[in-house]
Image (cartoon, grey):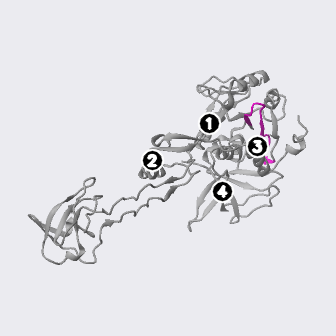
C-alpha cells in the first residue's frame, strides 16, 4: 500500500455523508453517445436541445370554422374563396369581404386575424354569414406560441421523460446525445441463499436481494446485470469478479463493469470473504464501514484495473437502504446529473424514541393530512431482514445519530422512494 493510502482508522465508521463523499470522488461523467430519438426514453441528456424554428411556425387555427378579417364582421355576407387544412394552407392573402374554410391546426391565411367557429356561422352556397360577436374568442394559436427558434427547450443532465421526448421531436430532433449508462455487475454471495425457483436446503433461504437491486439500478439509469450466486468461497469470488471485464479491456461483445456490487460477505465473520478475496485483485478501500443503521458493514473501493466495488450487506432491506444512499448517487454522478439524495420535510405522524449512536434510515410511509401537508409514519418494526416492510415503504425517514425522542408533529427529513 502506498504511503498516501488511507489508514484503517480513517475509513472505518464514517458518517453517511463522508462515506458518500469518498465514493463520489471516484465517480465521474462517463461520456456521451448518440441514440435515436425512439430509443432515448429514460436516458439522461448530454446536450442542450435548441429549437431551430418557431412552434407553431405560423398562426394556426384552434378550431374548425372560418378564417375572417375582424373588420368584416357585422357587414354583408362574406365570399368563400378557398380552404385551409392541416398540411395544406391557403396560399393567397385574404381580401376585404372574403373568408376561407379552415380546420383545427391549419395555417391562418395572410390577411385574416381571427377564426369564427362553424357553430357561429351560416353558409348559403358560396356566401357565409358570421354570427360571432366582437367579444368572441379569436381562436388563433399565434406563431411561436409554444416556443421560438433559438429557445433552449431541454438542458443537459435532464432525464428524458415521454413528455420531454415529445418536445425534442417537436424541435425536429431524430437523435439525441445522451450520457453513457454506467454498467453495474451485481453478485450475491453466501451459502445460505439459493436462487428463486430453486430447491432450498433445510438451512437456506431464497435470494431476494439481487432481483430488487437489479431493478433499482436499471430504474436509476444504469445498464445492470446480475450474475450467478457465489458461495462462501474466496477462490470463487476471485474467479467471478475476474471474468467481468474492466471498461478499458472490454470488447464490444463483452459485458464490462464500471461498478461491481457485491451483496453479502461484507462483514467481519469467518464466512465474510468478499474483501479478502478482492484484496487479491488489488482492492484499495476508501470506505470500510459506515456509521449507519441499517448497513454498517457497507464498504467501497477500487480494484487495480480501475473497477469500482461497492459492498452491501446481505440482508435485503439493509442492502436496499444503502443502495439508495450510495449506489444511486454513484449512478447519477456517472450520468452527469447532480447526485442525491434529495431530501424533503415532513411532519411526524407518530412519536419516535431517542436514536442511538448511528444515523438511522427508517422505512416509513408518507401520508397527507387534511390540509394537504406531508406526514410520515415509521414502521414499528425496523428489523433489517424484513422484505415485507420495505415492500410497503415509500420513504426513508432519517434520524441523526444521538437524536432525542421526537413527538408527533415535529418536522423530520425524509427521502421519497421511487414507487410507481
Assess disc 3: are there few (<14), some (14-19) or many (≥20) residues with their C-alpha within 10 Å of its C-alpha. Answer: many
Assess disc 1: are there few (<14), some (14-19) or many (≥20) residues with their C-alpha within 10 Å of its C-alpha. Answer: some
Q: Secondary structure at mark 3?
A: loop
Q: Which residue is mark 4?
A: 377
Closer to the camera in the image, 99 or 290: 99
Q: Residue furthest left?
A: 125
Sequence-first disc among 4 and 1? 1
Q: Which residue is mark 1?
A: 214
Residue 390 located left or right of residue 293: left
User: Mark 2 or 1, which is nearer the eye?
Assistant: 2
Spatial separation of the CA atoms under disc 4 and disc 3: 21 Å
Q: Position of residue 420 (x, y in %)?
A: 54, 48
Spatial separation of the CA atoms under disc 4 and disc 1: 28 Å
Whether residue 208 can be seen here:
no
Name the quadrant of the N terminus: top right
Q: Which residues are magenta?
A: 291-309
Q: Which residue is mark 2?
A: 173
Spatial separation of the CA atoms under disc 2 and disc 1: 32 Å
Closer to the camera in the image, 381 or 194: 194
Q: Position of residue 389 (x, y in %)?
A: 65, 45
Do tag 4 and tag 1 residues touch (Cβ < 8 Å)?
A: no
Assess disc 2: are there few (<14), some (14-19) or many (≥20) residues with their C-alpha within 10 Å of its C-alpha. Answer: some
Q: Position of residue 183 (x, y in %)?
A: 63, 35
Q: Residue at 21%, 62% (x, y): give it.
A: 92
Q: Which residue is mark 3?
A: 295
Sequence-first disc among 3 and 2? 2
Amino acid at each position: 500500500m502506498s504511503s498516501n493510502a488511507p489508514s484503517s482508522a480513517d475509513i472505518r465508521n464514517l458518517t453517511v455523508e463522508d462515506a458518500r463523499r469518498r465514493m463520489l470522488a471516484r465517480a465521474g461523467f462517463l461520456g456521451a453517445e448518440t441514440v435515436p430519438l425512439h430509443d432515448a426514453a429514460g436516458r439522461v441528456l448530454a446536450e442542450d436541445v435548441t429549437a431551430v424554428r418557431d412552434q407553431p411556425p405560423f398562426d394556426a387555427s384552434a378550431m374548425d370554422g372560418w378564417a375572417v378579417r375582424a373588420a368584416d364582421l357585422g357587414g354583408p355576407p362574406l365570399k368563400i374563396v378557398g380552404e385551409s387544412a392541416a398540411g395544406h394552407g391557403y396560399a393567397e392573402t385574404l381580401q376585404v369581404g372574403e373568408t376561407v374554410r379552415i380546420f383545427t391546426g391549419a395555417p391562418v391565411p395572410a390577411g385574416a386575424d381571427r377564426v369564427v367557429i362553424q357553430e357561429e356561422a351560416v353558409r348559403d352556397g358560396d356566401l357565409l354569414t358570421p354570427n360571432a360577436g366582437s367579444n368572441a374568442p379569436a381562436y388563433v394559436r399565434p406563431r411561436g406560441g409554444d416556443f421560438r427558434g433559438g429557445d433552449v427547450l431541454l438542458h443537459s443532465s435532464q432525464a428524458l421523460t415521454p413528455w420531454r421526448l415529445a418536445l425534442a421531436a417537436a424541435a425536429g430532433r431524430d437523435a439525441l446525445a445522451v450520457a453513457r449508462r454506467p454498467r453495474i455487475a451485481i453478485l450475491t454471495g453466501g451459502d445460505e441463499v439459493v436462487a428463486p425457483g430453486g430447491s432450498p436446503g433445510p438451512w437456506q433461504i431464497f435470494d431476494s436481494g439481487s432481483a430488487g437491486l437489479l431493478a433499482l439500478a436499471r430504474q436509476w439509469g444504469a445498464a445492470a446485470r446480475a450474475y450467478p450466486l457465489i458461495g462462501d468461497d474466496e477462490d470463487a469470488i476471485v474467479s467471478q469478479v475476474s471474468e467481468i471485464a474492466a471498461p478499458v479491456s472490454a470488447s464490444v461483445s463483452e459485458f464490462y463493469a464500471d461498478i461491481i456490487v457485491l451483496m453479502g460477505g461484507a462483514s467481519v465473520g469467518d464466512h465474510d470473504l468478499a474483501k479478502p478475496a478482492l484484496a487479491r485483485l488489488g482492492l484499495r478501500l476508501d470506505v470500510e464501514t459506515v456509521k449507519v443503521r441499517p448497513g454498517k458493514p457497507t464498504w467501497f473501493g477500487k480494484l487495480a484495473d480501475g473497477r469500482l466495488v461497492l459492498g452491501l450487506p446481505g440482508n435485503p432491506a439493509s442492502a436496499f437502504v444503502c443502495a439508495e444512499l450510495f449506489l444511486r448517487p454513484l449512478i447519477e454522478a456517472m450520468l452527469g446529473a447532480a447526485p442525491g439524495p434529495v431530501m424533503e420535510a415532513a411532519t411526524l405522524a407518530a412519536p419516535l424514541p431517542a436514536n442511538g449512536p448511528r444515523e438511522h434510515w427508517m422505512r416509513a410511509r408518507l401520508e397527507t393530512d387534511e390540509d394537504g401537508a406531508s406526514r410520515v409514519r415509521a414502521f414499528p418494526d425496523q428489523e433489517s431482514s424484513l422484505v415485507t416492510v420495505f415492500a410497503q415503504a415509500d420513504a426513508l425517514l432519517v434520524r441523526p445519530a444521538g437524536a432525542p425522542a421526537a413527538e408527533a408533529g415535529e418536522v423530520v427529513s425524509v427521502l421519497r422512494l421511487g414507487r410507481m
